Amino acid sequence: MPGRSAEEVNEEIRALWFRTGGMLNGEQRRQYQRLVMEWAAAAPEPRERPDGARRHPTNAA
């Protein structure tokens, strides 16, 4: 059974930041770290960007 898409995980990351107002306690930080690892596993291989910007879960396209 396939896992969630990077887009689905990214939405959960955004919701976590929104709910907490950007301030994570210890448990929320652990949840965020798990989500970022899940997002990284689900995200397609990075493409070379002309501006040199790096991909991040909250601004991935």
Image: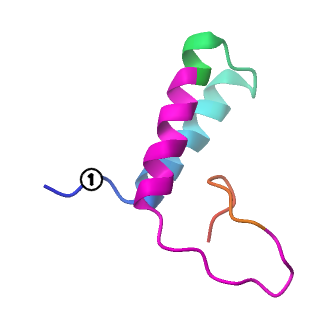
- For this orientation, the residue located farthest to the right is 51
User: In the image, is residue 56 above or below residue 17?
Assistant: below
- Classify mark 1: helix, strand or loop: loop
Residue 7 on image: x %, y % = 46, 60
- Residue drawn at 52 percent across, 51 percent down: 10
Percent coordinates x, y for residue 41 in the rendering = 42, 56
Residue 6 is one of the magenta-drawn residues: no
24 relative to 10, above or below: above
Instruction: Give the residue at the far top of this rendering.
Output: 26
Amino acid at circle 1: Gly
Residue under the point 32% across and 53% down: 4
Specify start and end residues of the magenta stretch as a single range.
30-53
User: Mark 1 sits on what residue?
Assistant: 3
Report whether 56 appears left or right of 30.
Answer: right
Q: Position of residue 16 (x, y in %)?
A: 58, 31
For this rendering, which residue is in front, 45 or 11? 45
Is 36 inside the magenta-drawn segment? yes
- Report the front residue among 42 and 14: 42
Q: Is residue 51 left or right of residue 13?
A: right
